Amino acid sequence: MKYKILLFTTVISIFFQSFKSFSQCNTYNIAKVSEITSTCSVLPMTMIHDINGLNYLYVANKEAGLRIYDISQLTTPVLVKNIPISAMGNMEAMNLTQQGNYLYLALGNHFNATQNAGMAIVDVSTPANAVLKDFWELPSSGGGSGIIKTEGNYAYLGAMKFGLVVLDISDKSDIKFVSQFIPNINYPTKNPNPNLYNARGMEVKNDIVYLCYDAGGIRIINVTNKSKPVETGRFSNPDLNGKPRAYNNVVLDDTLLYVAVDYCGLEILNIKDSSKIKISGKWNPYNCPASNWFTSPVHANEIQFNKNCKTLFLSVGKTDMISVDVSDISYPDSCNYYGGASNDIGTWGLGIYENQIYLSYVCSVIPFSSNWSGIKILSYTPCTNSIDKNKSDHFLISPNPGNDIIDVFLNKYKNEKHLVNIYNSKGKLLFNTNFENSVKIDIKQLNSGIFYFKVLNLERNEYSIQKFLKL
């Protein structure tokens, strides 16, 4: 493969598998809006925006338990509620999901064997006054939890080496154990190290669990009978036989699974026949498994999917975040990124909501070095918001056309913080700057042609786009 170095506002480099001159995801114009700083002793593992449209961010904050932030103003998140681990059996918060007005937390530090696996239910109908309803602990399950998902009246807990746990959550104040299923670890390797087989990532739909089982590949488990889960399919890339492997997280799209496979990047699996799972495509920019786990700049962990844009967002550790175009699943193409391999910080979790991206950073030494902990809140331009459909009356460019110095004036929301991005017709970001009422921009260095100005209100999280002609 040929790699190209892309340069943006600051000089940060990352290698891409290939390069397209233009695709829809090139117009995303990812930009940082704000950040929530933490410490290396209080790690934000992952986070989700309230699914009901309330302006709150829910963070599984490991040692600090659940933290809830008011993000009505994205530029200044405000901590409004904390449910500490002391209220949840001293099990640390590692993952979370939301169903209706309830949050479900996966509890138990999975980086060591000192904490049991467990879960908690939190009522967030009024997020700033969230109430812990109940928590539950799996006895003698040292090793913590990796993931929690729900469907209907049941929760599915990824309890690391203790497998899949099914819980009845019909009574939010009384979590009930239903069953436990530990997949066979003698696949794809006979007599393996059992510590490498962990229930990490998961999707659940129509009583089928799609489980990332770490070194054990993908397992498909039928839970129609909640008391007797049955494995109906399994897959591990044979190219990794005899090599380290880690199937970390998964997104389901009809009959396709998009799987984050650590230093091996991304696998796209066809599961139409779960007994005969096949690879439909791979994004493998560093030639895994020939590459080295510890030196790879990519460790794909959490994954989110913008279905309308046919784009995946991956938290990739050392290189922060990469978006991958999967409009052609046979040839997934990295098309945008945030951060870089040389900034000495690395991500663990990732969330998306509308035009917002959330990245959680953790302090670590292996497999990548990271010396900063916190959350970065980013904005991007989803492809569903086409330029022709966006309102353009929020600001004025004068003169337009122009060829020298131009002015950008706000028509509304004056005296509020804004960000202006300028990108070319191929979607490449050329320039950005912050302003409040107006800003002068020197465009003499631009070639003649059509450009697009995007103005984002950082306080209201609204934006508009206009065409501009450089003479």
Image (cartoon, helix red, strand yellow):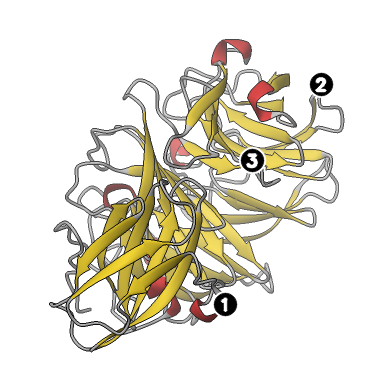
Please state which of residues 377 and 386 is positioned toward the viewer in this rendering.
386
User: Percent position (x, y) of residue 265?
Assistant: 38, 61
- Place of residue 54 in the rendered image (x, y in percent of width and height, measured from the top left): 66, 41
The CA distance from mark 3 to mark 1 is 33 Å
In-front residue for pair 242/411: 411
* Residue kind at label 3, given as amino acid type: Thr
Report if the CB atoms under discs 3 and 2 are less than 8 Å apart. Answer: no
Disc number for residue 173: 2
Discs 3/1, front = 1
User: Between marks 3 and 2, how big is the CA–CA gap?
Assistant: 17 Å
Horizontal and vertical percent position of residue 449: 27, 89
- Tell me which residue sits at (23%, 47%) in the image: 294
Residue annotated with mark 3: 97
How many numbered markers are drawn?
Answer: 3
Find numbered disc 1 in the image and state the secondary structure of the residue it sits on: helix
Residue 237 shows in the view: no
| Image quarter in which the N terminus is found | bottom left
Residue corresponding to mark 1: 389
Q: Quadrant of the C terminus?
A: bottom left
Horizontal placement of 273 versus 29: left or right?
right
Label 1 vs 2, first from the N-terminus: 2
Rendered residue at 59%/69% (across/down): 307
